[in-house]
Amino acid sequence: MVTDDQRKRARQIAEAIWNFHNERGHPDNQIATDQSGIEVLYMGKLAEFEYTNEHGGTVDDALKAGGDGGIDFKIKLEFTVNVKAISYNGPDPLLMVECSEIKPDTIYVAAYYDKAKDDVILQGWAWGASLIKENSVRRFRRDGPLNFTTLIAELRNRKFLRDHQVKETK
């Protein structure tokens, strides 16, 4: 469970990232249409904080023109981890990774953002290579990016990540 201090920090980071990209005229590449860009960034940072609570590491708050490059954390075996937050709570929720950003050797962790509780629950994970091979591609808004998708119910158990966690990253 994320703490109130982590919620406050996630909000600050999300606003800073949003302002940084807006001031530079960078395009909005969010997948969802029912939340503001800041809310999407906030959910993502909360998911990263929850990941650090369970697996160690530090949330990256650096402002970079190209974002974090799809690397949120590294684990002992030197695989990169990218946490993807969703807020959809209907049937068949999906892990979604932008096609233009996916990396075969990255571990993608799905996290569910519960708006009522303002908290995040880590779900499961998939290799980028598996998502590419599965080749289930969808666009969630007319001008939005293409995304590799897979059902969260079909993701791998997080035990592997717990067994290979690190305490410090980046």
Image (cartoon, helix red, strand yellow):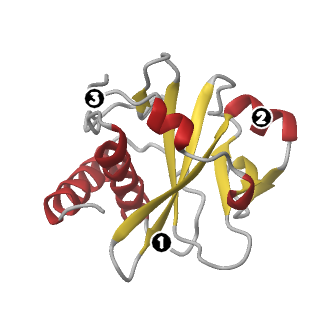
- Please indicate, yes or no, whether residue 101 appears anywhere in the rendered image: yes
Provide the residue designation for mark 3.
Answer: 167
* Vertical position of residue 60 compared to residue 29: above or below: above
**Which element is circle 1 on?**
loop
What's under tag 1, amino acid-wise? Gln
Left or right placement of residue 37 versus residue 134 in this view: left
Count residues near mark 1 (Cα–Cα under 10 Å), then give few for <14, some for 14-19, many for 20+: few
Residue under the point 71% across and 38% down = 99
Q: Does residue 147 appear left or right of residue 51 in this picture? A: right
Q: Secondary structure at mark 2?
A: helix
Q: Residue furthest top?
A: 78
The image quadrant where one finds the N terminus is bottom left
Asked if disc 1 and disc 2 are in contact, CB closer than 8 Å, the reply is: no
Q: Nearer the viewer, mark 1 or mark 3?
A: 3
Q: Are marks 2 and 3 in contact (CB under 8 Å)?
A: no
> Going 85% across and 33% down the picture, which residue do you hit?
133
CA separation in Å, label 2 and label 3: 27 Å
Instruction: From the image, tell me which residue sits under label 2.
Output: 130
The local secondary structure at tag 3 comes to: loop
Q: Quadrant of residue 160?
A: top right
Residue 121 tag number: none
Which residue has dot 1 on it? 35
